[in-house]
Structures are given as structure tokens and as C-alpha cells.
Image: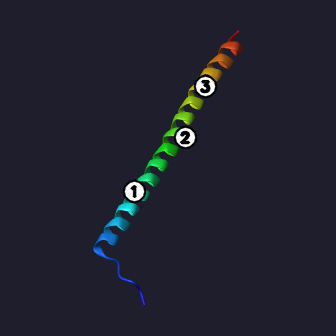
Amino acid sequence: MPTLLTPEQLQARNRRSLWIALGLVGFIVLIFLTTFLRMQSNLEERKALNAAATAEAAR
């Protein structure tokens, strides 16, 4: 037989669920931003290397 939760228990459970969801969303945003910024810096570095290689080949 399932136990029924009191309104206070339901409110506490909903609050916990909300904080867990916010924590997960924050973690996902952190991973996304880290990945995006690393990809951006790698693209800039690649452009610099290509420009250097082109300048070297033009000599």
C-alpha cells in the first residue's frame, strides 16, 4: 500500500527536484561553454598555423 505524502513533504520533494534540475542544467551549460571556447581557440590557432604555412610556402 503506497504511503501518501503530506503537503509539506510534497513541497520539500518538489524543491529538491527543482534544485537537482537547476544543478544539472548548470553543469550542462558549463560543459557546453567549455567545449565551445576550446573549439574556438583551436580554430584560431589553426588559422594562425595555416597563415604561417602559407607565408612559408610563398618564400
- Name the residue located 48 percent from the left edge and 49 percent from the top edge: 28
Instruction: Tell whether 52 sits left or right of 8.
Output: right
Tell me the CA gap for discs 3 and 1.
39 Å
For mark 2, does the 10 Å Cα neighbourhood hold few (<14), some (14 to 19), or many (20 or more) residues? few
Q: Which mark is residue 19?
A: 1
Which residue is denoted by mark 3 in the rendering? 45
| Residue situated furthest left in the rendering | 7
Q: Amino acid at mark 3?
A: Glu
Q: Nearer the viewer, mark 3 or mark 2?
A: 2
Q: SS at mark 3?
A: helix
Seen at 49% across and 40% down, the residue is 33
- The answer to which of 23 and 50 lies nearer the viewer is 23
Q: Nearer the viewer, residue 6 or 29?
A: 6
Q: Quadrant of the N terminus?
A: bottom left
Amino acid beneath label 1: Trp
Dot 3 or dot 1, earlier in sequence: 1
- The image position of residue 45, as x and y in percent, is 60, 25
**Can you tell which of label 1 and label 2 is closer to the viewer?**
1
Q: Who comes first in sequence, dot 1 or dot 2?
A: 1
What is the quadrant of residue 52 in the picture? top right
Kindly give the residue lying farthest to the bottom in the view shown: 1
Q: Is residue 55 left or right of residue 14?
A: right
State which mark lies toward you, 3 or 1.
1
Q: What residue type is disc 2 on?
A: Thr
- Rendered position, 49 above or below 59: below
Query: Along the polypeptide, which appears first: circle 3 or circle 2?
Result: 2
Tell me how the rendering is colored. Answer: rainbow
Mark on residue 35? 2
- Compared with 36, 16 (above or below) is below
Q: Secondary structure at mark 2?
A: helix
What is the C-alpha distance between the residues marked 3 and 2? Answer: 15 Å
